[in-house]
Amino acid sequence: DPEPGDLIEIKRPLYQHWALYLGDGYVLNVTPVDEGAPSLLVSTISIFTRKAKVKKQLLKEVVENNDWEVNNKYDLFLNPFPVKKIIKQAESYIDMEVPYDVLSKNCEHFVTMLRYGVGDSSQVN
């Protein structure tokens, strides 16, 4: 079971989507600014957009029928912030539009910045 502050890796057909677990079944993740776009298209649409919206959603709604796991892989070489700081900072972004770039500011960069203070994305690297 995920703990507040954990990174959630969602295994989508062509890429991994990342979210931050807030607790009580909720995650924080970035989604296309176009609210009508299905979440499966987040990656494809985001190649063409420069903004994303930060949303608090139920983990089960974000995951849909995909496999997922807690993946705090960066803990091996980065120290996570205290959980209260992670959650407080994460919640300050709810419903905000943030810059998005598939190569330098994607969903994984966003959640690793919240957990560690450093945005990283191994699927881009």
Image: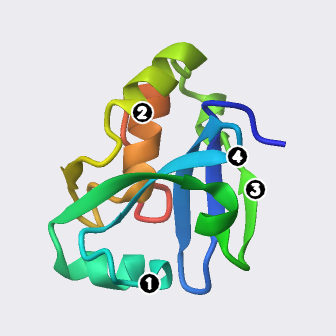
- The mark nearer the N terminus, 1 or 2, is 1
Q: Nearer the viewer, mark 3 or mark 2?
A: 2
Which quarter of the image is occupied by the N terminus? top right
Label 1: element kind: loop
Per the image, the residue denoted by label 2 is 90
Please report contact status of discs 4 and 3: CB closer than 8 Å, yes or no: no
Q: Nearer the viewer, mark 4 or mark 3?
A: 4
Label 4: element kind: loop
Q: Nearer the viewer, mark 3 or mark 1?
A: 1
Q: Amino acid at mark 1?
A: Pro
- The mark nearer the N terminus, 4 or 1, is 4
- The mark nearer the N terminus, 3 or 1, is 1
Does 54 sit above or below residue 115? below
Q: Amino acid at mark 2?
A: Ala
- The mark nearer the N terminus, 2 or 4, is 4
Residue at image point 54% right, 15% down: 84
Q: Position of residue 14 (x, y in %)?
A: 55, 85
In this image, 53 relative to 51: left or right?
right
Q: Position of residue 109 (x, y in %)?
A: 38, 49
In this image, 23 relative to 89: left or right?
right
Q: Residues within 10 Å of mark 4 (few under 14, many from 20)?
A: some
For the residues labelled 3 and 2, the Cα–Cα distance comes to: 20 Å
